[in-house]
Amino acid sequence: MTEKDNNTDRQLVKSLRKGDVFAYNELFHKYSQKVYNFSIKHLENEEDVKDLVQEIFMKIWDKRTEINEMKSFNGFLFTITLNSIRDNFRKKVKNRKLIDKWLEETEPYSNSTVLSIEFKSLEKVVNTLVEQLPQKRQMVFRLSRNEGFSNDEIAEQMNIQKKTVENHLNMALNYLREKLQEHSFVVILFFALFY
């Protein structure tokens, strides 16, 4: 997350807190696909995922006055997403052992203060891993994920082929997934939502 993204989110949250539907729609368009992409991996069907995404963003609207515009919107979204998936598992999963294991693993993160601290820690872990990438790959990754540039824009700015940009991004994401796969569900959630 760049300072530019944080400032944009802060402005959107400030407007959202006042009931601005445009700001709500902007946040929905910016983050709903990330929530969807993560949730589809953990829920049984697409309809459940669509319902969950709608439920999460309805909670955001309902709790809009509680969002602290000076804190990370990502952290707030992370908390709501995690808790919504946990609630969904409680309702949907038949295998009690799986529920217990998952709930046990995510229990420490149900407190939003703990989750906020964990979010910052996870962000540092990912940034440290990104710094280990070769310089060109690192630059492509940061332009894409942190600055929000399209593959075409990155190719033009770096004077390389679009396919080269795609290759760098795929290799960077595979590297990060490989390094993070041994971590808990919460790390995977963080990576899915924000990278």
Image: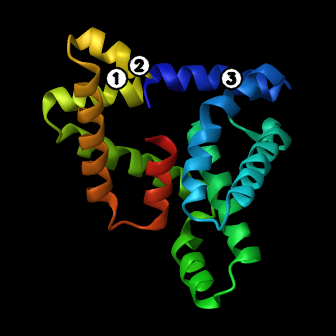
Q: Is residue 39 above or below residue 102?
A: above
Assign the N terminus to one quadrant of the image. Answer: top left
Q: Answer with left or right where residue 66 lies relative to residue 158.
A: right
* Earlier residue among tags 2 and 1: 1
Within-10-Å neighbours for mark 1: few <14, some 14–19, many 20+: some
Q: Residue at x 64, y 88 (%)?
A: 95
Q: In the image, what residue type sits under mark 3?
A: Leu
Q: Position of residue 155 (x, y in %)?
A: 28, 16
Q: Residue at x 29, y 9 (%)?
A: 156
Q: Identify the residue position indicated by label 2 in the image.
A: 149
Q: Does residue 70 appear anywhere in the picture?
A: no
Quadrant position of residue 142: top left
Say left or right for 80 vs 104: right
Q: Residue at x 61, y 30 (%)?
A: 30
> Residue 145, located in which quarter of the rendered image?
top left
Q: Is residue 139 above or below residue 129?
A: above
Q: Say which amino acid is labelled 1.
A: Leu
Q: What residue sits right under mark 3 in the picture?
A: 12
Q: Secondary structure at mark 2?
A: loop
Q: CA distance from mark 1 to mark 3?
A: 22 Å
Circle 1 is placed at which residue position?
143
| Amino acid residing under circle 2 | Phe
User: SS at mark 3?
Assistant: helix
Mark closest to the chain's N terminus, 2 or 3: 3
Judged left or right of residue 1, residue 9 is right
Question: Do the residues bearing badges 2 and 1 touch, measured as CB atoms within 8 Å?
Answer: yes
C-alpha span from label 2 to label 1: 6 Å
Residue nearest the viewer, comparing 178 with 46: 46
